[in-house]
Image (cartoon, rainbow, N blue to C red):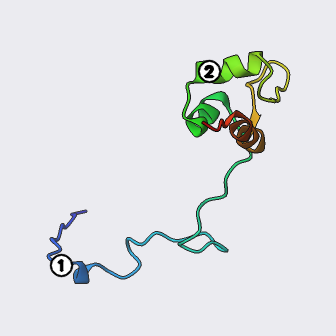
Amino acid sequence: MSRRSTAISSPAEIEPNSLQFRQPAGRTQNQSPPRRRMMRVREAAAYLGSSPWKIRQLIADRRIPFMQDGDGPFLLDVRDLDGFIERSKRIV
Protein backbone atom coordinates (compact mmCIF):
# COMPACT_ATOMS: atom_id res chain seq x y z
CA MET A 1 0.00 0.00 0.00
CA SER A 2 1.54 3.31 -1.01
CA ARG A 3 0.78 6.59 0.68
CA ARG A 4 0.59 9.79 -1.28
CA SER A 5 1.25 13.17 0.18
CA THR A 6 -0.03 16.29 -1.44
CA ALA A 7 0.85 19.88 -0.73
CA ILE A 8 -1.98 22.33 -0.15
CA SER A 9 -1.11 25.78 -1.39
CA SER A 10 -4.19 27.68 -0.24
CA PRO A 11 -6.98 27.33 2.33
CA ALA A 12 -9.48 27.05 -0.53
CA GLU A 13 -8.05 23.63 -1.39
CA ILE A 14 -8.97 22.15 2.00
CA GLU A 15 -12.01 19.92 1.79
CA PRO A 16 -15.06 21.39 3.52
CA ASN A 17 -15.77 19.95 7.00
CA SER A 18 -12.47 18.06 7.07
CA LEU A 19 -10.79 20.18 9.74
CA GLN A 20 -13.72 21.93 11.37
CA PHE A 21 -14.45 21.58 15.06
CA ARG A 22 -17.98 20.36 15.64
CA GLN A 23 -19.93 21.98 18.44
CA PRO A 24 -21.92 19.72 20.77
CA ALA A 25 -25.66 19.87 20.21
CA GLY A 26 -27.37 22.66 22.13
CA ARG A 27 -24.30 24.93 22.44
CA THR A 28 -23.45 27.86 20.24
CA GLN A 29 -19.96 29.13 19.53
CA ASN A 30 -20.33 32.26 21.68
CA GLN A 31 -21.33 30.44 24.89
CA SER A 32 -18.70 29.64 27.48
CA PRO A 33 -18.58 26.17 29.02
CA PRO A 34 -20.69 25.73 32.16
CA ARG A 35 -18.85 26.73 35.33
CA ARG A 36 -18.52 24.07 37.98
CA ARG A 37 -19.97 24.92 41.37
CA MET A 38 -17.52 22.96 43.54
CA MET A 39 -13.76 23.46 43.34
CA ARG A 40 -10.74 21.77 44.85
CA VAL A 41 -8.16 23.75 46.81
CA ARG A 42 -5.86 24.43 43.83
CA GLU A 43 -8.77 25.58 41.65
CA ALA A 44 -10.08 27.81 44.46
CA ALA A 45 -6.61 29.28 44.92
CA ALA A 46 -6.45 30.16 41.22
CA TYR A 47 -9.99 31.60 41.41
CA LEU A 48 -9.06 33.84 44.34
CA GLY A 49 -5.58 34.65 43.02
CA SER A 50 -4.02 33.10 46.09
CA SER A 51 -1.91 30.08 46.99
CA PRO A 52 -3.21 26.62 47.94
CA TRP A 53 -1.45 27.03 51.29
CA LYS A 54 -3.47 30.19 52.03
CA ILE A 55 -6.74 28.44 51.10
CA ARG A 56 -5.93 25.55 53.44
CA GLN A 57 -5.16 28.07 56.19
CA LEU A 58 -8.55 29.76 55.63
CA ILE A 59 -10.22 26.33 55.85
CA ALA A 60 -8.35 25.50 59.08
CA ASP A 61 -9.36 28.88 60.56
CA ARG A 62 -12.99 28.18 59.52
CA ARG A 63 -13.13 31.39 57.49
CA ILE A 64 -14.32 29.58 54.32
CA PRO A 65 -17.00 26.86 54.41
CA PHE A 66 -15.96 23.57 52.84
CA MET A 67 -17.12 20.02 52.21
CA GLN A 68 -15.14 16.84 52.58
CA ASP A 69 -16.32 13.30 51.89
CA GLY A 70 -14.45 11.17 54.41
CA ASP A 71 -10.72 11.59 53.82
CA GLY A 72 -11.26 12.98 50.30
CA PRO A 73 -10.17 16.39 49.05
CA PHE A 74 -11.61 19.63 50.39
CA LEU A 75 -14.34 20.98 48.11
CA LEU A 76 -15.24 24.65 48.12
CA ASP A 77 -18.43 26.18 46.73
CA VAL A 78 -17.96 29.05 44.29
CA ARG A 79 -20.75 30.97 46.04
CA ASP A 80 -18.91 30.70 49.36
CA LEU A 81 -15.73 31.97 47.69
CA ASP A 82 -17.65 34.92 46.25
CA GLY A 83 -19.11 35.59 49.71
CA PHE A 84 -15.62 35.49 51.20
CA ILE A 85 -14.49 38.08 48.64
CA GLU A 86 -17.41 40.35 49.54
CA ARG A 87 -16.80 39.98 53.31
CA SER A 88 -13.09 40.70 52.87
CA LYS A 89 -13.50 44.00 51.02
CA ARG A 90 -12.34 47.06 52.89
CA ILE A 91 -13.12 50.70 52.21
CA VAL A 92 -10.04 52.87 52.51
**Viewer-side label of 1, 2:** 2
Nearer-the-camera pick, 61 or 12: 61
Residue type marked 2: Lys
Q: Is residue 72 above or below residue 8?
A: above
**In front of the other: 34 or 15:** 34
Residue, far right: 70
> What residue is pinned by disc 2?
54
Q: Quarter holding the N terminus? A: bottom left
Residue 42 drawn above or below residue 60 = below
Distance Cα–Cα, label 1 vs label 2: 52 Å
Residue at figure coordinates x 81%, y 30% from the top left: 65
Q: Amino acid at mark 1?
A: Ser
Taking the image as shown, residue 75 lies to the left or right of residue 11, namely right
* Residue toward you, 7 or 73: 73
Quarter of the image where one finds residue 76:
top right
Q: Is residue 30 left or right of residue 70?
A: left
Q: Position of residue 16 (x, y in %)?
A: 37, 82
Looking at the image, which residue is at 67% across and 58% down? 34
Residue at image position (60%, 18%) is: 53
**On screen, residue 92 above or below 72:** below
* Spot occupied by residue 78 in the image (x, y as percentages of width and height): 73, 43
Circle 2 — which element? helix
Quarter holding residue 79:
top right
Secondary structure under tag 1 reads loop
Q: Quadrant of residue 84?
A: top right
**Residue with the mark numbered 1:** 10
Identity of the residue drawn at 51% across and 71% down = 22
Circles 1 and 2: CB distance less than 8 Å? no
